[in-house]
Structure formats: structure tokens, C-alpha cells
Amino acid sequence: MEGRGTSRLRKHRLLGLCWRPWWDSAVDQVISVAQQIWQSATTSGELPSAVITAWCVLAALVVVAWPTSWRITRHVVTIVHEAGHGFAAVLSGRRLSGIKLHSDTSGVTLSVGKPRGFGMFLTAAAGYPAAALLGLGAAALLVRGYAGAVLWLLVLVLALTLVQIRNWFGLWSILVSGVLLVALTWLASEEVLAAAAIFITAFLLFGAPRTVLELQSERRRTRSRTSDADQLGSLTHTPALLWVGFFLIVTVGALALSGWWLFNAVAG
């Protein structure tokens, strides 16, 4: 007579045999996708022609300069802005408690720690330069031919930000942006991929100084003293306008340096 323990063991073995092919197939699929992503991110190619590159940069400039398109696309810069705050908070030892993105293109990053000191300073200072520095890093990859790496870098930023989102609009914004980027990297040809990477890089670089100009315009119009620049002024006992100038120097400097790199890469 078969014991109850023996019968249970036999059932577990049968279940294991049934599940193992599905599990092995899923693992193989994950490994295959990871290998394709790695290959896409590490494969170097050539930049588009000077004409195509110029059109991509011009298109990015128009999107940033035209108020109608900027109202929609500015959400992308806000995502990077808040991600910059969050990264700086974690890097400086503060505890990140969440990020919220709002439909008016504003956002807020919440972190826990000392209200003053280097951690708070770094967190407050990281928002406005974030898009410019990400654009600078993307430009450095672009001129070396790593257009795929640029887009997967952006996907990584979105993925890391997603886990800290604490409202529905923010969740929707991140998911839509992520799906579009993944679809682009997965389906587009190398030429389209490179053109898209140039456009997105230029958009970040043009968008960053525009947000700084909007910051100062908002401060002058509403007399609000709750901005990042005002927080930095309070933390360092310096005029907030000094930090607006700092943001502008960083963002314009990143734009100029990236433009120089791209010009030399295309012209050469």
C-alpha cells in the first residue's frame, strides 16, 4: 500500500515535470531579450549625414521653442528633473520617499533626512541641471556611435523613476514614455534609431535652459520663493538669483559643449 508521503512526493514530481518546460522557455526568452538589449546598447554605428543631423537638431529646437508642442513635451524634462532630485537624494544618503508628476508639468520629489547640510543642498541643486547633464552624456555616446545606448540609457532612467512614482498621472507619463522608447529601440532601423537619438538628445539640451528661463520668469511674476533656486539661497545664505545663474551656466554650457562634439563628429 502506497504511503501518503510517497503519493505527495510523486505529485510534486509530476508538477515539476509539467512546469519545467515552461520555466526553461521563459528563462531562455529573458536571456535572449537581455542579449539583444546588450547588443543594441554596445554596438557602434555611424552618425547620420550632416543634413539629417541638422534637421533632427532643428526639429528639436522647434519643439522646444513652439509653445504648443512645448506644453506637451515639457513633461519629459520634468521627469528627468525629478529623477535628478531623486538620484541626488539617494547618492547623498537621504531616504527617497516618492516622486509625483502633475499634469501642469510640475513635479515634486520627497526625501527624508536633515533639513540642511550637503545632502539637502545636493538634492535641491540636481533638478535643473539633470536634463542638461543627461543630454551631455547622451551626446558623448552619440559621437562615438552608440545611438542604441542613448535610448536604452533613457529607458533605464524611466525604469528607476517608475518605482518611486506615487501618483496616477506620473505613472501614466512614465509608462507611455517607456513604451514609446522601447518600441523605438526594438523596431526601428539603425538609421531611424540614430536620428531619434539625436533628436531626443538635442531636445533635452535645448529644453534644459528653457526651464531655467521659465523658473526666473515665474519667480518674477508670482514673487514665489519656494523654487529650487530659493531653497539653495536659503541653504547657503546667498541670493537665489545666483543659483538661477548657476543653472543657466550649466545648461547652456552643456548645450554648447555637446553641439561642439556633434559638429566635429559630423564634419569629420
Image (cartoon, helix red, strand yellow):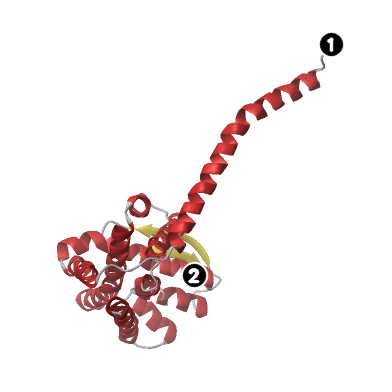
Residue 148 at what x, y percent from top left? 39, 61
Residue at image position (41%, 87%) is: 237
Residue 110: x and y in percent read 44, 64
The amino acid at mark 2 is Ala
Label of residue 108 in the image? none
Q: Quadrant of the N terminus?
A: top right
Task: Using the rendered view, name the quadrant where residue 268 is placed.
Answer: bottom left
Query: Image height check: is 98 above or below 249?
Result: above
Q: Nearer the viewer, mark 1 or mark 2?
A: 1
Q: Which residue position is annotated with label 1?
A: 1
Report helix, strand or loop for mark 2: helix
Residue 89 is tagged as 2
Residue at position x 51%, y 53% in the image: 35
Mark 1 belongs to which amino acid? Met
Name the side, left or right, on which 263 lies relative to 17: left
For residue 94, side relative to residue 254 (left or right): right
Residue 104 location (% of width, % of height): 26, 60
Near mark 2 (Cα within 10 A), the count class, few <14, some 14-19 or many ≥20, is many
Residue 171 vs 27, above or below: the answer is below
